[in-house]
Image (spheres, rainbow, N blue to C red):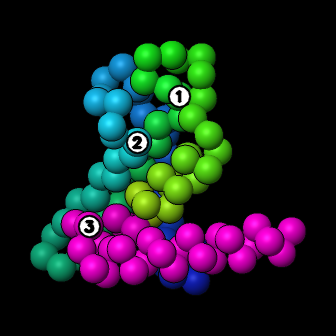
Amino acid sequence: MEARGLTVPKLEELDPSKYSARLLGLTLVTSKGWERTPTLISIRLREHKNSRGFLTSQTILDTMLHEMCHLKHGPHGLRFRMMWKELRAEFDDCEHAL
């Protein structure tokens, strides 16, 4: 992620009781002109109606990769989707190398 210039200043657990069950992650970015400054990534770790049950590690990781794409690209456009696909492939390569 460093090679892409992706850093997360603050990472926290998304409170499942405060958001819709459909929301798995949230990225807060401040924008000034064309400059985007990430401030926070919040990831859902627990099931919506069962705070003792955790989501699968694959769901959590995919959500994290998704939210990291928002650090470079805001909306879910073509560049966003291409980057998400690339990050997934990079992670798969790293995982298989272990």
For marks 3 and 1, the one nearer the N-term is 1
Q: Position of residue 83 (x, y in %)?
A: 43, 78
Q: In the rendered image, which residue does mark 3 sit on?
A: 76
| Contact check, label 1 and label 2, Cβ < 8 Å | no
Instruction: Decide if residue 92 is on the left or right side of residue 39.
Output: right
Tag 3, which secondary structure?
Answer: loop
Identify the residue at image location x=26%, y=67%: 76
Marks 3/1: CA–CA distance:
24 Å
- Quadrant occupied by the C terminus: bottom right
Q: Amino acid at mark 2?
A: Leu
Q: Amino acid at mark 3?
A: His
Q: Residue furthest left?
A: 33
Res. 71 image quadrant? bottom left
| Within-10-Å neighbours for mark 2: few <14, some 14–19, many 20+ | many
Q: In the rendered image, which residue does mark 1 sit on?
A: 46
Identify the residue at image location x=52%, y=17%: 51
Tag 2, which secondary structure?
Answer: loop
Instruction: Decide if residue 45 is on the left or right side of residue 39.
Output: right
Q: In the rendered image, which residue does mark 2 sit on?
A: 24
* Highlighted magenta segment, given as a residue range: 69-98
Identify the residue at image location x=33%, y=39%: 23
| Within-10-Å neighbours for mark 3: few <14, some 14–19, many 20+ | few
77 drawn magenta? yes
Tag 1, which secondary structure?
Answer: loop
Q: Position of residue 64 (x, y in %)?
A: 50, 55
Identify the residue at image location x=58%, y=53%: 61
- Quadrant occupied by the N terminus: bottom right
Relative to 10, residue 68 above or below: below
Q: Amino acid at mark 1?
A: Arg
